[in-house]
Amino acid sequence: MQILTTAAGLQAYTERARQTGKRVGLVPTMGALHAGHLQLVRAARADCDEVIASLFVNPTQFNSAEDFRLYPRLPEADAALLAPVGCTALFVPSVDEIYPRPTVLRFDFGALEQVMEGAHRPGHFNGVATVVSKLFHLARPHRAYFGQKDWQQVAVIRQLVADLSFDLEIVACPTIREADGLAMSSRNLRLDAEARAVAPLLHRVLVAAAAEVRQGILPAQVRASAASALASEPLVTPEYFEVADAQTLQPLSEYAAGRDVVLCLAAHLGGVRLIDNVVVAA
Amino acid sequence: MQILTTAAGLQAYTERARQTGKRVGLVPTMGALHAGHLQLVRAARADCDEVIASLFVNPTQFNSAEDFRLYPRLPEADAALLAPVGCTALFVPSVDEIYPRPTVLRFDFGALEQVMEGAHRPGHFNGVATVVSKLFHLARPHRAYFGQKDWQQVAVIRQLVADLSFDLEIVACPTIREADGLAMSSRNLRLDAEARAVAPLLHRVLVAAAAEVRQGILPAQVRASAASALASEPLVTPEYFEVADAQTLQPLSEYAAGRDVVLCLAAHLGGVRLIDNVVVAA
């Protein structure tokens, strides 16, 4: 596995790969890798000749300086995990390498980012779209792999790719969970034992809500049940719980035939902010 | 010269070119070609093995439906002009080919687009950045060529390329003028004889203003002289005349050592809107 630290080095690597007819897969990550990330690398390896993983804690997508500072960074451990699952090149740039000058351009995704993560983390999706565009231009992948745990992020990136005609395919992989249902997340490393013990509540609430959606219980009632279940645990401070159209991400007041529904939540547990979601197919 | 009409056809063409090690140049145009465009193609030909010219009257960068409707369209004549100057592929897509679905994403370039063309044509640079991003992704050029007559457009595109790390180089070519100083523009075709006769006033005003800048006459006085000169011709309705920093495009109240100055104007002549500019090197 080759280690690349410069933008020019990555561009040269991937240009050579494409010139020799290789299929290139990209797995953008912020590091502190877990089984969810490794699943993305395995999926890329099954499709592509070259698998480039990036490790970059992107400052522009953090709306909290504290969250950015505390985000786990374990580059050596990450590198050791990546090679065995088929990663062929690891891109670990500095912040200056990705942002040699401050960015002027701002992205606005309209209604898609006026809900949930976009509403609660101002500027978050601008930072995501900026760094993902940069990584796409540096790595030039045929396919790029993202986890469905960040459902809204995947929707925003699909819109970015469609609207700017990026010549690549987005592959979204299912959320990987711990045995007790907790969605794998790099931020789980920051949970203390007490918070970790109650964290599976988030997924339980989503599963219960999904059952209600399948029974046709209206979104307002599903929201109320979820709010009440989350309020039962004093260690959990809910930020939002939403019943939304799975594609447009807009909150639902009723269900539409043939449209998937996504249930999304964000909550704070002992100073750590976690998100999760479950999709209910139409 | 190959004629390509689909996005997929252009992508396949340019992917083959790059796989065989060829240098690709792109000249994005809205057609109705004149000597200014042909200069861009010649410059591309001098640098590159493949020169792709695009002809696409981009609806999203017009803030006036009337201006879009009346924009000159001469695709056969354009094709006949391009082959002799070294264009190897001509991309002539339909609107549906470029915009299969409405675009959701919006670009904001901040202060760079809050002046001059951006201020007077709301949404213009969002449309420019969108279509240029698409053309870059479809044509995958090593270099892309633009005319300096659209000085602010070049500044916006350079910012786009820097901020999203597009792997290509922007080449800006000098404005080509008629013998009487009128900047070549596709919209000149729409000038009637009377408007055409007075149109060289625009360049004369810029040249006189540039002389004042070189003498150190302050921007406020330069603006006043230009306004008075433009007002002397009843067929000309000035929209703006600006003395600005050539890089940031922000209006100047005084000159800064070592900074180039750009003088920009827009005016209406007999229903046709024209722009022009002159740069005064520091």
Image: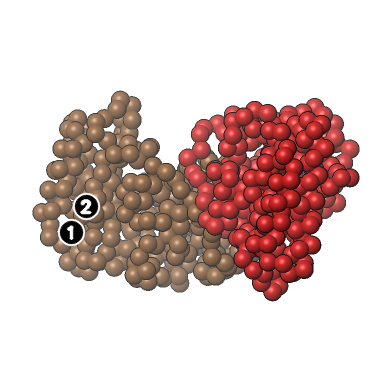
Chain colours: A brown, B red
What type is the residue that disc 2 sits on?
Leu
Q: Is residue B213 above or below residue A263?
A: below
Answer with the quarter of the image where residue A239 lies: bottom left
Residue tagged 1: A236
| Residue for point 22% across, 62% down | A269
Q: Are marks 2 and 1 on the same chain?
A: yes
Identify the element where label 2 is drawn: helix
What type is the residue that disc 1 sits on?
Val
Image quadrant holding the N terminus of chain A, namely bottom right
Residue A201 visible to an observer of this rendering: yes
Image coordinates for residue B261, horizontal then vertical, percent = 70, 63
| Residue for point 37% across, 71% down | A69
**Taking A279 as reference, is B30 left or right?**
right
- Answer few, some or many: residues within 10 Å of disc 1's Cα (few below 14, many 20 plus, some between 14 and 19): many
Residue A52 visible to an observer of this rendering: no
| Residue for point 35% across, 65% down | A64
**Taking A100 as reference, is A201 left or right?**
left
Return the residue nearer the eye: A80 or B44: B44
Residue tagged 2: A202
